[in-house]
Image (spheres, rainbow, N blue to C red):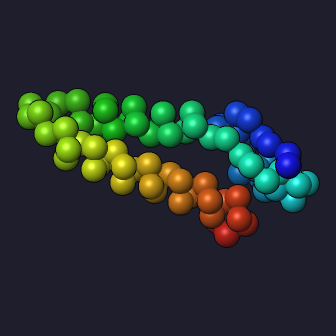
Amino acid sequence: MHVLHGATGLPDAVIRDCVRAGIRKINFFSALLRTAMDQVRANGTRQDNDYLGFKQTLVAAWRDEIETQIRLYAGRD
């Protein structure tokens, strides 16, 4: 199996080309870290300690990012 490491930041067209060329596993963890930091910054002014509420917000943002990547890799973007 061919693996693409470090796919975060690559243009969508390059990802599509890689999939067509036989790549079957694509690592994009940095994109999830960036999504998490975006959520931290967006919620940085909160004065409460609602960890579970923040966690739910973060998981929802991750889910959106992962679904976007799956659609792209499957050619359904």
What is the number of callouts on the image? 0
Seen from this angle, which residue lies furthest right?
21
Q: Position of residue 53 (x, y in %)?
A: 19, 47
Which percent across, then down, holds residue 8?
A: 64, 38
Q: Is residue 2 left or right of residue 74?
A: right
**In the figure, is residue 48 to the left or right of 40?**
left
Q: Residue at x 91, y 54 (%)?
A: 21
Residue 28: image quadrant is: top right
The residue closer to the viewer here, 69 or 52, is 52
On the image, the x and y values in percent for residue 12 come to 71, 51
Q: Is residue 70 left or right of residue 14?
A: left
Q: Quadrant of residue 38?
A: top left
Q: Is residue 17 visible?
A: no
Residue furthest bottom in the image: 76
Residue found 79% across the figure and 53% down from its top: 24
Could you tell me which quadrant the C terminus lies in? bottom right
Residue 72 figure quarter: bottom right
Question: Which residue is located at x 36 percent, y 49 percent?
Answer: 59
Q: Is residue 3 visible?
A: yes
Is 53 positioned to the left or the right of 7 in the image? left
Q: Residue furthest left?
A: 48
